[in-house]
Amino acid sequence: MRRLTLLLLMIGTVAWTQTPGPSPTGRSGSRATASPGPASALLGILRDETHPDQAMRDVVAIWETDRWFTFPKFEETAKNVAAMMRRAGLEEVEIGTPPADGVTQGGFWTMPLAWDVKAGTLEIVEPQVPADSRMLADYQKIPTSIGMWSGPTPIGGVVTDVVLASSDLQNVKGKLVLGQGASKSALAKAGALGVISETTENRDLVDERGWVNSFGDNGWSFTKGSAPLVCFSITPRGSQRVRELLKKGPVKVRANVDSRYYAGVYPYVTGVIRGTDGSNAEEVLSLGHLFEQGAHDNATGVASIIGAAETLNRLIKGGRLPRPKRTIRVLGMGECYGTMYYLEHNKDRVKRTIAAMCIDSPAGLQNLAGTEYTWILNPHSATSYVDAFALRLAEEYYPSVGRPWGWMAHRSSTDNYLGDPSIGIPTVMPHGGYGVPAHHNSYDTPATVDPKSLRDLIVMNAAYTYFLASAGVAERRWMADVALTRGYSQMAAASGKLLDQIALAQNAESLGRLFYQIRERLDYALDRESQAVRSAWDLKEGLADLAAFSQQQKMRLERAVRDRAAALGIDSIQPLAPPRNREAEQIVVRRKRMGTITLDDLPREQRESFPAASFWGVPVSALYWCDGKRNLAEVIRLTELEMGPQSFDFVGYFKFLEKHGYVEFTRN
C-alpha cells in the first residue's frame, strides 16, 4: 500500500470530466465517467507520458520479418524482439527454442513442422491473356501469394491444368484445384498437385488476397505426415478472371514453388521488470503472439506490450513511479502452440502468475467505425476480480481520450485462454477493429495502424499490469469491492432477463421451467460473482449482502411467475426440473493435460463427427468445468448455465475423448 500511496502523493489526483461513452454492457449510451479512485493517478500519468512513436517503429520492424511467415524469418523476428525488450529496459531477456518438429506436443497442441519458401509464382500460360493479367501470384512481391506450409513443385516448376473444386475427384490428378470442395486429405489421396485458394474475409478488397495459414491434414498447423500439397492464394479479381476463362475452356498455368519442410524451432521471447520481492516474486504476465503476416495481427499487440513495459521502466527509473513488488513479465511467442509449450515448461512461473493480459488486436484508424476496444473477460469457470478491475480502468480511461468501449463475455480464438482452470491464470483481453476488415489479408499493413490506438493499448496494459504488480492489502480490498459492485449489476441483469421471459410465457409448462430456473440462475450468478470477489479479498459482510440481494431477486421473480400464471388463468405453478441424466451422473471426468483438446493427432475420419474443440465453444466450456470432482451431469448443468440450453451430446463426446486417451473417467 505504501508504494501506491507514494504514487498518489507524487502525481496528485486526476479529475475526469463527463464524456459520452458506451454502457459497460457494450450497448451505446451516454453516462458520466467513473469518479476518481485508487487507479486514477496511475492512469493520468500513463496517459500523459505514453508516446507511441517507438511502438509504431516496432510494429514496422516486426512486420518486416513476420510478413514472410517462414520459420527462418521467425527466428529473425525473435532476435529483433529480444533487442526491443532490452532497449525497453527489460531484464533477463531470453529466447526459448521450442521444437518445430511436427511431433512434440504442448498440452494436446502438436507443434508445427518448420517450413521455408524461397519463391512461388503462379502464371496463366493458356489461353493467352494480356501480360498484366498473366501473373496470379508471386511470393516475392506479395508474400500471401503462397499458402503457409505449401509443398514444393518439381524443380523449375510445372505446367498443369486448373480445375474447379467439386465433390468429384476423378479429374484432379496432377492438377491445381480452384476453390473449396473436398478436404485437403481427400485431394492428396486423389493425386492433386495442390490448391488455389480464393478465400478471403473481405471480397471488397478485390486486389488483396487472403492469407492461408491453416494447412494441416488434421488441424490448424502442418504436422509431420501432413500432405505436402502446393497452395497458392489469389485475389478476388484474379479468381473472377480464372473462373471466366474456365467457362470458355481449359486453363493451364505454370506453377513454381521452392519450399521445404524441416525440423526447426518455434521460438518465444520473454523478459521482465523485476519486482522488489525478488526472483521468486509473484508475476503479472502480458502476452501477445508473434509470427503472423499482418501488422494488426499481431505486430501491434507485441509492440504495445513492449511499449507499456518501456513506459513503465522510464517512469520507474525517473522516480515517477515506485518499483512494483511483483514482477511484470512480457512474453511474445507463436500463437497457442508456443504458449502451451511455454506454460508446460515453465510451471513454476505459471504457479506464481496472479493475472495476465493478452493483446492480439488490431489498432485501427480511429476515424473509422468499428475500431473501438471491446474487453473480453474470463470464462465463468474462472471468474475473477480482474474482470471487474479491467472494466473499471476502461470506464475511467477511454472517456478521457474521447473513445467508446465495450465488453463481452468470454470467447477465445487466441491466447486469452489462460483462465482455463487447468492453467489458472485469470486473463483479460482487449480486441479492436481494423476499420476496413483485413483479418488474414495482404491489406493488413502498418499503413493502416493508428498511433492513437497503439497509445490506448499501451496505457491500458501498463495500468493493468503495474497496478496489479504493486497492489497491497488496501488495493486488493478495493478491487474486491469493484468486483462486488459488478456482482450486483450481473445479478440484476440475470433477473431482468428472467423477467422478460416470464412476461412472454404462454402456458404452465414454460412458467414451470422458468420457476425452476429462477433459483438455478440466481444461485449460479451468486456463486460466480462471489468467487470473483473472494479472488481479491474475502468481503464476508459484503458477500452476505450480495446473498441477501440474490434472495430478494428470487422473491421478486417468483411473484412475477405467480402474477403471470394468474393472468393466464393458471391456478398454481410448480418448478419443473429437467429430466435427470443418470448416465452422466455416474461419470466424473479427469483432465490429463492443461489446455484444450485439438484432436490434431487424430485423423478426421476417426473423430465420429465430434468437434476438434481447440477454441471457445460449448465443448471447451464443459471441459473447463471438469475438475475431477464434479460428475458429468453437474458439468452439463454448469455449461448450460454459462452457454444456454444445448443439444450437444456431452456424454458421447466425453466417451469419445476417454476412448482416445484424452481424458480419464472415474465413476460414482
Image (cartoon, rainbow, N blue to C red):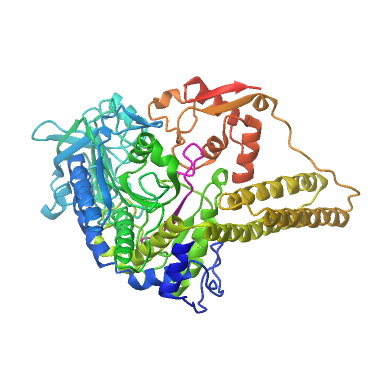
Nearer to me, 440 or 270 = 270
Does 254 sit above or below residue 104? below
Q: Is residue 67 visible?
A: no
| Image location (x, y in percent) of residue 377 | 51, 52
State the residue lying farthest toward the right: 571
| Residue 100 shown left or right of residue 586 in the figure | left
Picture quadrant where residue 178 is located = top left
Does 294 sit above or below residue 8? above
- Residue drawn at 39 percent across, 71 percent down: 45
Q: Is residue 189 visible?
A: yes
Q: Main secondary structure of the magenta part?
A: loop
| Image location (x, y in percent) of residue 475 | 52, 60
Nearer to me, 5 or 488 = 5
Nearer to me, 605 or 594 = 594
Nearer to me, 125 or 531 = 531
| Image location (x, y in percent) of residue 445 | 25, 58
State the residue lying farthest toward the bottom: 17
- Residue drawn at 55 percent across, 74 percent down: 30
Does 529 sit above or below residue 214? below
The reply to whether the magenta stretch includes residue 345 is no
| Image location (x, y in percent) of residue 406 | 50, 62
The image quadrant where one finds the C terminus is: top right
The reply to whether the magenta stretch includes residue 421 is yes
| Residue 201 shown left or right of residue 177 in the figure | right
Range drawn in magenta: 418-434
Picture quadrant where residue 388 is located = bottom right
